[in-house]
């Protein structure tokens, strides 16, 4: 059943911006290098159900005093798994 196959986690994600300046607001999420949709409790054809898109994602870090290399993805405010 479809409702069993949901996004339960992101195994790997990387926040990067190769042209990031020293300003905080310039250090934003520009891509997700690897993501995996999985549900260990699903007892059906799990490989068919994959993450096909993220409708909204936001990179944020409220510690404003850090060096730009320390600005990392601390959360995804909204995400939707669909197939």
Image (cartoon, rainbow, N blue to C red):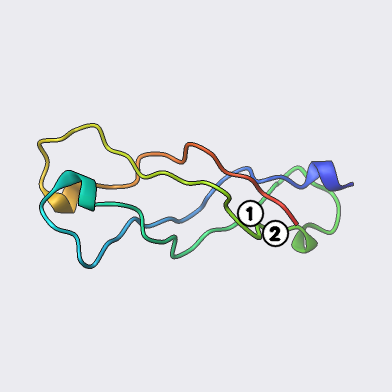
Looking at the picture, does residue 47 appear above or below residue 1? below
Identify the residue at the far right of this view: 1
Q: Secondary structure at mark 1?
A: loop
Q: Residue at x 76, y 63 (%)?
A: 47
Q: Quadrant of residue 31?
A: bottom left
Total numbered labels: 2
Residue 83, horizontal then vertical, whole percent: 75, 57
Residue 59, horizontal then vertical, whole percent: 36, 45
In the picture of the structure, the residue carrying the numbered disc 1 is 37
Instruction: Name the one closer to the observer, 6 or 57.
Output: 57
Count neighbours of disc 1 (C-alpha within 10 A) and say few if under 14, some if 14 to 19, many if 20 or more.
some
* Mark 1 → mark 2, Cα distance in angstroms: 6 Å
Residue 54, horizontal then vertical, whole percent: 57, 52
Q: Quadrant of residue 74?
A: top left
Instruction: Name the one closer to the observer, 26 or 49.
Output: 26
Residues at marks 1 and 2 touching, judged by CB atoms closer than 8 Å: yes
Q: Secondary structure at mark 2?
A: loop
Residue 72, horizontal then vertical, whole percent: 28, 47
In the picture of the structure, the residue carrying the numbered disc 2 is 50
Looking at the picture, does residue 74 appear above or below residue 33? above
Looking at the picture, does residue 29 appear above or below residue 66? below
On screen, residue 24 versus residue 78, left or right, reads: left
């Amino acid at each position: 059943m479809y409702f069993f196959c949901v996004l339960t986690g992101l195994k790997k994600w990387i926040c990067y911006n190769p042209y990031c300046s020293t300003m905080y607001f310039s250090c934003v999420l520009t891509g997700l290098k690897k993501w995996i949709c999985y549900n260990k409790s699903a007892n059906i054809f799990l490989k068919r159900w994959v993450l096909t898109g993220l409708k909204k994602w936001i990179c944020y870090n409220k510690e404003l005093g850090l060096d730009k290399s320390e600005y990392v993805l601390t959360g995804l405010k909204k995400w939707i798994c669909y197939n």
